[in-house]
Image (tube, rainbow, N blue to C red):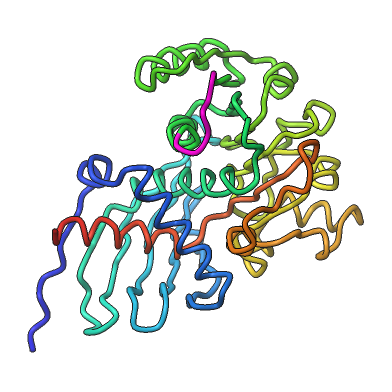
Amino acid sequence: MNAPAPMVIDGDEVSASLSYRDCIAAVRDAMIALSQGRTRQVLRTIIPVGDHKAFGVMPGALGLDDFFGAKILSVFHDKDRPTRSAHRGFVLLFEGDTGFPVCLADAEQITRIRTAAASAVATDALARKDAAVLTVFGSGVQARSHIEAIACVRDLARVVVWGRSLASAETFAAQAQAAIGLPVTATNDGKAAAEAADIICTVTGAREPILFNDWVRDGTHINVVGSSGLGPVEIDMPLVQRARFFVESRAATAQASEFQQAKAQGLVDDDHIAGEIGEVLQANGGRRSPAEVTLYKSIGHIVQDLAAASVLYRQRLG
């Protein structure tokens, strides 16, 4: 039997067709399956291919006889702005019954949407139900995606955007407000931005902390997203120690820079990990009190990419 040509879904179609709500639902199911041991994956491989350039391969399977595949991409940092990077490549989806490659979807746009969707899943599970003010540290692609995704799981009253450059943050805030229809204000005062928040998302390319424990109010939920490997950190170690700390998977915590640095300093040990998000979803909650600070450390997981690609593939099939 000749293999059919896989459908190709480019970035424009991914952006137009993969809604945050659909992706949130798919990622939620994938994280539960991950924690139940129904998925299959290994830690991703990152190969340096030049100065500030890397090639990544992330294989996995949503489950036995289910979709499997890999995300294959380049991560190239902007030489003039080393905190900015581009992710270019594909998510390759294989069909579980036949083994045929059935879909090749743009990885950059899937990553953009599913990363924010994963934070929304964690926020829905961990943030206070009355959380209404979102602060985003960062003013890039993920900042916009996180605002749109978090708005799907909480009734937001307003959004605060922090950036090192106030002018850039103000431009971003005006564009986001026009697109989303929520009040969005800009600041370069990190302390004020954090103190205003019920929910904080850090989505920067920072290599040193830009969010500090002393700035965070009791009852805040935090999604720490920007650093996806060892080295860079977005938050200080006392905040890691203070927060009730949740992860995508315990195995992937080996690449969670903030946790590993706090562990190396003797501030936490492996028991500080309160659980995987999939475990929280099964238990119907991970927050123990309104005053508790909860934290979700996002690294990115192949089952999220495969779940998003499977939504697109099924939609195209009709």
SS majority, magenta = loop
Q: Quadrant of the N terminus?
A: bottom left
Q: Which region is colored magenta?
A: 152-157
Q: Is residue 157 left or right of residue 240?
A: left
Of residues 155 and 256, the one drawn nearer to the viewer in this rendering: 155
Q: Quadrant of the C terminus?
A: bottom left
Q: How many marks?
A: 0
Measured along the vertical axis of the image, is residue 42 above or below residue 13? below
Identify the residue at horizontal 52%, vertical 62% (top origin).
31
Looking at this view, name the residue that lies furthest to the right. Answer: 266
Q: Position of residue 89 (x, y in %)?
A: 32, 55
Q: Is residue 11 left or right of residue 61?
A: left
Instruction: Kindly indicate the quadrant of the structure image that contains residue 279.
Output: bottom right
Looking at this view, name the residue that lies furthest to the bottom. Answer: 1
Q: Position of residue 144 (x, y in %)?
A: 44, 30
Q: Is residue 123 left or right of residue 208?
A: left
Is 315 colored magenta in this rendering? no
Q: Position of residue 293 (x, y in %)?
A: 77, 40
Measured along the vertical axis of the image, is residue 197 above or below residue 167? below
Identify the residue at horizontal 67%, vertical 29% (top origin).
198
Identify the residue at horizontal 52%, vertical 16% (top origin).
169
Instruction: Kindly indicate the quadrant of the structure image that contains residue 149.
Output: top left
Is 156 colored magenta in this rendering? yes
Q: Position of residue 154 (x, y in %)?
A: 53, 34
Measured along the vertical axis of the image, is residue 143 above or below residue 288? above
Of residues 71 and 277, the one drawn nearer to the viewer in this rendering: 277
